[in-house]
Amino acid sequence: MSSVNIGILISGGGTNLQSIIDNIKNGNIKGEIKIVISNRKDAYGLIRAERSGIKALYIDRKEFNTEKEYNEKIMEEFEKRNIELVVLAGYLKVLSRGFVEKYKGRIINIHPSLIPSFCGKGCYGEKVHQMVLDYGVKVTGATVHFVDEGTDTGPIILQRAVEVKDKDTVDTLKERVLAVEHELLPEAVKFFCENRLTIEGRKVIIK
Ligand code: GRF
């Protein structure tokens, strides 16, 4: 089975990116990260990529007139490298319609809750865990899903639950959910690279 060319978009620390790098290095994922692109210059994930010899690129949104043109620049970088799978690993910008159409069925996102709870516009990062604590739910978790035209609305690939403890803070809860993310995202990428994912309507069947 040939290796799948992967393009990864980040905005922050890149611990999810690191989990994919590590799972490629140990042979668990039959893929190759061809490029990591960030919309934030200070994203530590860019350093993680460089340390692993992966092309790391900061693309400044201010150099483009529209979101459409910004996304076209990202697509240009991906086309150069024949990217077959796009992974959003803590990427905080919304993709353009053109981007989602071009890569439909080949864009995977990680979200730090059990979708459809605590997701959607403006619901990302630590805000998610604060909403979980404020609501008082007993269980939260992580979700890996395909990206469609909506926000956090695509077909779900994998989910795993995390218990919310009485004394949890955003930091303690975030840490436990992140640990699950670091297992779930590489697993979903692995399944994609082994061609084991089939989308049937809203369902994702894992062969
Ligand atoms: C993770 O919690 C992920 O679920 C969310 O953003 C965070 C990214 O963390 N989308 P990192 O940059 O991978 O460390």
Image: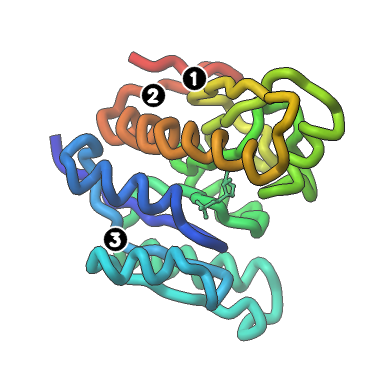
Spot the residue most to the front: 167
Q: Is mark 3 within 8 Å of ligand 1?
A: no
Closer to the camera in the image, 73 or 87: 87
Give the class, few, some or many, for how many residues have Cα within 10 Å of label 1's Cα (few <14, many ≥20).
Answer: some
Query: Which one is earlier in the sequence, the residue at label 2 or at label 3?
Result: 3
Look at mark 3 in the image and give the residue it sits on. 34
Quarter of the picture holding the N terminus: top left
Give the class, few, some or many, for how many residues have Cα within 10 Å of label 2's Cα (few <14, many ≥20).
Answer: some
| Rendered image: mark on residue 204 | 1
Query: Which one is earlier in the sequence, the residue at label 2 or at label 1?
Result: 2
CA separation in Å, label 1 and label 3: 26 Å
Give the class, few, some or many, for how many residues have Cα within 10 Å of label 3's Cα (few <14, many ≥20).
Answer: many
SS at badge 2: strand
Query: Which one is earlier in the sequence, the residue at label 1 or at label 3?
Result: 3
In percent of the image, x 29 and y 28: which residue is there? Answer: 195
Do residues under tags 2 and 1 come within 8 Å of each other at their CB atoms?
yes
